[in-house]
Amino acid sequence: MAVLLETEKVTRVLPGTVPVTLVEDIDLTIGDGEFVAITGPSGSGKSSLLYLLGLLDMPTEGEVRFRGKPTHDLSEEERAAIRLSGIGFIFQFHFLLAEFSALENVMIPMRRLGRIDRREMEARAADILERLGLRDHLRKRPDQLSGGQRQRVAVARALANDPPLILADEPTGSLDSHSSEQVFEILRGIVEEDGKSVVAVTHDLDMAARMGRGIHLVDGRIVSDGPAVAHLSPQLS
Amino acid sequence: MSLTLEIAVTHIRGRLRQTLVSILGVTMGVGFAIAMAALMQGSQDDFVSTLVDAMPHVQITDERREAPVQPADIAFGAVEWHGLRPKEDIRGILNPTAALAALEAWDPGAVSAALSLSGVARYGGTERGVTVFGVTPKDMIAVSTIEDDMTAGALTDLDGAGFAAVIGERLADRLGIEMGDSFDLTVANERSRRIKVVGLFRTGVVATDEGLIYVRLKVAQTLSGRQNAINDIQIRLADANAARMVAARAEAMLGYKAVSWQEANESLLEALQIRNIIMYTVVAAILVVAGFGIFNIVSIITHEKARDIAILKSLGFRQSDIRGIFLAEGALMGGIGGILGSALGYGLTWGLGNVRFELEQATEITNLPVTYDVLHYVIASGLALLTAGIAGYLPARKAARGNPVDIIRGAT
């Protein structure tokens, strides 16, 4: 399994009168095709770690390497370029652009990347949305969709440029159980069928237990990292 | 449409009412700026053309720019001398025939030679100081607009009329004389003659209408007792803007002071330039005020769309992409305002140009002078676009620099 993302002694401290350490000494490796759950109590640094992995935030110390390439010295534009083609983000809330249809929202990353022509973009976006069960909702705007549908559009947008890594911050946190299950199955499909890596922050331990690997954080440090079921069984029981 | 522009359009469409108010601000600013510039430029052009029409483009007089070198200077070089009586030169252009022949050979334009004298006009116990201008009528007509200003008779009526004059209407009123009447004219050397009025003119310039008398050149020469003398050569050019060059060459050729119309009105032209600077400053101020409206609306949009900005950044948009979106919003408002403002400015200029009014002294109904100049539209629209760009850039820069993580955390 090739290494997709790795961190080395990553620490993130928020400056201020009283500096706040978000994560500390994080060493981890994410390989291709891994389905990783990041769990931990509130304020343990799960989302902070996710943003560092996604190059949205920069570590105070340590290094994040994407495909073996150090990112610490990269410019904002270079990191943006990696995010554009290499990483897809899914957040707890869909964060779709309200003025654009589902299809247009999915096309936004493609248009920014600009590798294919407009017709191909439309076909590809429609294909992804159809795959996620949104065939009849391509032209609908976010306010015309249900919560679960919006989140699936957000997943489709994350997949738009076919990135090898999907980072999800509590992707089912705002959904009912039925929609949560739908989204989870989609994420599992992304890993198992497409061979992509998915790293998801979640409070849902049942869901985390069904993922391949579990990383548990406490106070910004990794306290356990291993196969999810085994790893989370003490907490589930 | 590019993605940046498409997002920008959706943003300003989402704030349609405020956007329209901002665009209206720019429209009004550009429109009134153009109308004001058209009016100012129009009045300036009208004023300058009146000035250029009313006076010779180049006037050569019997004066010299430098005080003449005295014989004592030539004879004794650097030796200092006091109380020496200077050489008295006879007034007038020396060897006028040769001077006029030289000008005719060069042919810079229409040339008119004249003898200008100071005198006093008397009629029925009323006296007025006047300038007596001895001219050759057909030459004078070629270098001036006097023929257009005639209200009775013609300048050419002087030919063959003996001691006759064409005088200003105001002078006639002051003296109480009419066409066909005769008055006494005394020039500086106290020769007095009875002069018959064969024509009246009104230029609209009070000093001219009250104080100028045209007579034939020969009459002036007879009155002054200096046959063949001239002290004033007037030149009218096909291109009035070449006057400075022609004056310089004529001065070098003849040695007498040659004054272009620009030099004669230097302080006036400077005042017009200052007026232009004030005008463009006011125009810029109007557009800066309009720019505040754009700044305001783009700031509101960046605040409202902070979450979208964060999301776009997470999707891989660069800071420059984000800046581009909001810059495009400012530029769109400025651009639309500039186009509408140009149309408004054209309409206002047309309206102002068609305002008709009648002046007491004018012979015909007058319109406000306006100028349609593409430069006004380019400057006003360009300034609007620049102001809008800056107004959009400032909040755009702030929005682009924001940390998306802070916004995403805040949103969740």
Image (spheres, coloured by chain):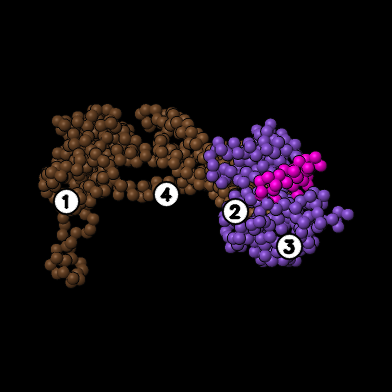
Callout 3 secondary element: strand
> Which residue in the protein does label 3 denote?
A23
Q: Which chain is brown?
A: B
Disc 1 residue type? Leu
Q: Nearer the viewer, mark 1 or mark 3?
A: 3
User: Which span is picked out in magenta?
Assistant: A170-199
Give the quarter of the image for residue B175.
top left
Q: Are marks 2 and 4 on the same chain?
A: no
> Which residue in the protein does label 1 denote?
B254
* Protein chain holding label 3: A
Q: In this view, does B375 lie above or below A62?
A: above
Disc 4 residue type? Ile
Give the quarter of the image for residue A101.
top right
Identify which residue is drawn at 72% across, 35% down: A145
Q: How far apart are marks 1 and 2 (CA)?
A: 81 Å
Q: Which of marks 4 and 3 is in front?
A: 3
Callout 4 secondary element: helix
Q: How far apart are marks 2 and 3 (CA)?
A: 22 Å
* Protein chain holding label 2: A
Q: Do labels 2 and 3 share a chain?
A: yes
Cβ–Cβ under 8 Å for marks 1 and 2: no
Query: Is residue A59 at least partly visible in the picture?
Result: no
> Which residue in the protein does label 2 denote?
A82
Residue B343 percent location from the top left of the image? 48, 33
> Which residue in the protein does label 4 denote?
B274
Cβ–Cβ under 8 Å for marks 2 and 3: no
